[in-house]
């Protein structure tokens, strides 16, 4: 409630749901940029890259240090997940899954920061709106799911060739008869397009809802009664603990589905 | 839920992150992990080999000990035999020596007895002459009766 002490809960939440947009002039136009989402995601992405890169650069086959052991643990966990689903060359899919997992996890984890912390800090620098959780921005989740979508198309072409992929689009799953071409294609198209949408919407929905619940609980702090204030502390703690589970599961689901979709693109019907 | 240029920016940064991970993170870490796996596998097989070697060495050592014990027993037996032989030989030599000494002693005894007898004989002759002279109350020419006296002494 640092920014608008007299605003009431609705205004408080609306304020917190407003992105830091640039340029301010053409607000809500297509060329608007959510500076907060981009900044936070880039900082976290850079943190992940540098951290893992440092460990990877110094990685030895000897006895690993704690940092290297942790990084290797994560890598082997991700590699195991990829190996279970995909039985081909893992040199791209493995790093892709690792990037997805860590990056999504870190961005989700921003939800665990106090909901007013980053907006309060940015306000000190004269920036009124700041949303800390990039994965609660539908642009962010769709950016990742569409990249995965591009990779699905790419690997479908790579594995089956353009002709083979088209053949599959028109003849599976019902059969080769010309009368079935249209139903086949329609079904495949829906299946294909539903992948990025479900991938993005699932993560976005979970994170957006989680953020909203944090804001609602934070509203209790300014409700004006000590009893509600105590409830707010308890609620915030409990929801925060539960949210640790949600952010991990969502990061894991995003990773596993990415692996599954791309390995499906390699499969021949 | 308004889509905007954020989407494109985030897609690009996601692609860059994936590229970075593919080229700079995954291969290095994976290499280290695989090398360590090989090292661990080597270490385990080496330990297994050492274990097997130890086992065979134990068997060898046991055989050696058994052999050594056998040899020691043989040596002791031989030594005992030799000792027995030496004792037997010494005993035989001692018996020979005893017999020799006995023979020498017997010779000595015989000589001494002979000498004593001779001396006695001489004395007997003299005593007999003395006695006879006393009996006869006169001097007898010892030279004239020597033959008679010698005969007497020999008869004693």
Image (cartoon, coloured by chain):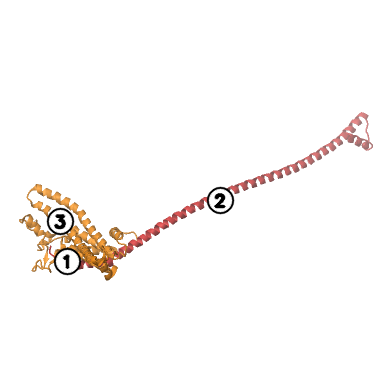
Mark 3 residue crowding within 10 angstroms, few (<14) / some (14–19) / many (20+): few
For marks 1 and 2, the one nearer the N-term is 1
Q: Is residue A19 left or right of residue A84?
A: left
The vertical placement of B56 against B106, above or below, is: below
* Residue designated by label 3: A209
* Residue designated by label 1: B7
Could you tell me which chain the residue with mark 1 belongs to?
B
> How much space separates mark 3 and mark 1, taking CA atoms?
20 Å
The answer to the question of whether label 3 and label 1 lie on touching residues, with beta carbons closer than 8 A, is no
Q: Colour of chain B?
A: red
Q: Residue furthest left?
A: A6
Q: Is residue B135 left or right of residue A135?
A: right
Could you tell me which chain the residue with mark 2 belongs to?
B
Residue at 40%, 57% in the rendered image: B44
Foreground disc of the pair 3, 2: 3
Q: Which mark is residue B67?
A: 2
Mark 1 residue crowding within 10 angstroms, few (<14) / some (14–19) / many (20+): many
Coordinates of residue A148 in the picture (x, y in percent): 23, 65
Of residues A148 and B93, the one drawn nearer to the viewer in this rendering? A148
Coordinates of residue A260 in the picture (x, y in percent): 26, 61
Coordinates of residue A113 in the picture (x, y in percent): 16, 56
Could you tell me which chain the residue with mark 3 belongs to?
A
The vertical placement of B6 against B85, above or below, is: below
Q: Colour of chain A?
A: orange
């Amino acid at each position: 409630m640092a920014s608008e002490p007299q605003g009431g809960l609705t205004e408080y939440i609306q304020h917190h749901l407003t992105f830091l947009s640039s340029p301010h002039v053409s607000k809500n136009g297509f060329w608007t940029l959510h500076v907060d989402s981009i900044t936070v995601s880039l900082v976290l992405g850079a943190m992940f890259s540098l951290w893992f890169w440092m460990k990877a650069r110094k990685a030895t086959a000897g006895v690993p240090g704690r940092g290297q052991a942790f990084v290797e643990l994560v890598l082997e966990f991700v590699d195991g997940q990829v190996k279970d689903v995909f039985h081909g060359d893992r040199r791209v899919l493995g790093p892709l899954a690792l990037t997805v997992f860590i990056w999504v996890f870190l961005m989700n984890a921003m939800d665990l920061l106090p909901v007013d912390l980053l907006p309060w800090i940015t306000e000190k620098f004269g920036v009124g709106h700041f949303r800390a959780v990039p994965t609660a921005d539908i642009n962010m989740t769709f950016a990742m799911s569409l990249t995965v979508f591009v990779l699905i198309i790419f690997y479908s072409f790579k594995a089956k060739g353009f002709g083979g992929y088209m053949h599959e689009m028109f003849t599976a799953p019902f059969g080769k008869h010309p009368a079935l071409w249209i139903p086949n294609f329609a079904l495949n198209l829906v299946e294909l397009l539903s992948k990025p949408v479900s991938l993005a919407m699932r993560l976005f929905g979970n994170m957006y809802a989680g953020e909203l619940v944090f804001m609602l609980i934070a509203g209790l702090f300014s409700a004006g009664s000590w009893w509600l204030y105590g409830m707010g502390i308890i609620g915030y703690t409990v929801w925060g603990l539960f949210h640790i589970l949600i952010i991990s599961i969502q990061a894991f689901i995003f990773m596993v589905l990415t692996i599954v979709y791309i390995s499906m693109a390699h499969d021949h019907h | 839920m308004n889509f905007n240029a954020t989407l494109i920016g985030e897609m690009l940064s996601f692609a860059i992150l994936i590229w970075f991970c593919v080229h700079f993170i995954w291969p290095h870490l994976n290499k280290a992990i695989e090398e360590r796996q090989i090292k661990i596998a080597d270490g385990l097989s080496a330990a297994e080999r050492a274990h097997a070697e130890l086992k065979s060495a134990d068997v060898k050592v046991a055989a050696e000990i058994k052999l050594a014990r056998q040899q020691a027993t043989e040596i002791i037996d031989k030594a005992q035999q030799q000792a027995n032989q030496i004792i037997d030989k010494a005993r035989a030599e001692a018996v020979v020596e005893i017999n020799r000494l006995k023979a020498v002693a017997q010779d000595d005894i015989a000589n001494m007895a002979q000498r004593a007898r001779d001396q006695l004989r001489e004395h007997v002759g003299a005593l007999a002459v003395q006695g006879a002279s006393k009996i006869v109350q006169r001097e007898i020419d010892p030279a004239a009766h020597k033959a008679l006296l010698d005969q007497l002494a020999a008869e004693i």
